[in-house]
Image (cartoon, rainbow, N blue to C red):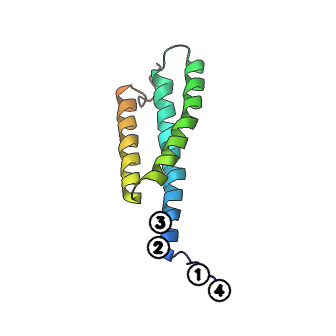
Amino acid sequence: MSARATPKLADRMAVGGRLLLAALGGYAVAALATALLAVSLPGPKAEAVSAATLVSFAIMAAAIIWVFAARTLARAALVLAITASGMICALWLAGAFSAGVPT
């Protein structure tokens, strides 16, 4: 007989929640970081966007690692939300949301 315990529904839901937060939250943070870097990096816009896109892969990986390393799912969600909010504020201050105004 096997003495292996089967995971409970709560454990499965916790892993599923982390997986969902890692995928969606990590993507959101990486996309916001890409936009912020593309706006703030010096040089030609094409090179700034390319560099920001390359950096976004590392940011996405770091966000995923953070979600699975955090003590609780709520703490992981809170940190990603605060990070995303900070980047949204920085984008707003940089003027990235001014529609119709050429930069």
Which sits in the foreground, 44 or 97? 44
Q: 7 above or below 76?
A: below
Report the Cα–Cα distance between label 1 and label 3. Answer: 23 Å
Q: Are marks 2 and 1 in contact (CB under 8 Å)?
A: no
- Which mark, residue 1? 4
Q: Which of marks 2 and 4 is in front?
A: 4
Q: What residue is shown with label 2?
A: 10
Picture quadrant where residue 72 is located: bottom left
Q: Is mark 1 on a helix, strand or loop?
A: loop
Local packing at callout 3 (Cα closer than 10 Å; few below 14, some 14-19, many 20+) is few
Q: Are marks 1 and 4 in contact (CB under 8 Å)?
A: yes
Left or right of 72, for residue 50: right
Q: Name the residue under label 1.
A: 3
Residue at 51%, 25% (x, y): give it.
Answer: 38
Type of amino acid under label 4: Met
Question: Compared to 36, does 70 lie above or below?
Answer: below
- Tell me the kind of residue under disc 3: Ala
Comparing marks 3 and 4, which lies closer to the viewer?
A: 4
Type of amino acid at the residue the image marks with label 2: Ala
Q: Cβ–Cβ below 8 Å for labels 2 and 3?
A: yes
Residue found 47% across the figure and 34% down from its top: 33
Whether 30 is drawn above or below 3: the answer is above
Q: Distance between the residues labelled 2 and 4?
A: 25 Å
Whichever of callouts 2 and 1 sits on the residue coming sooner in the sequence is: 1
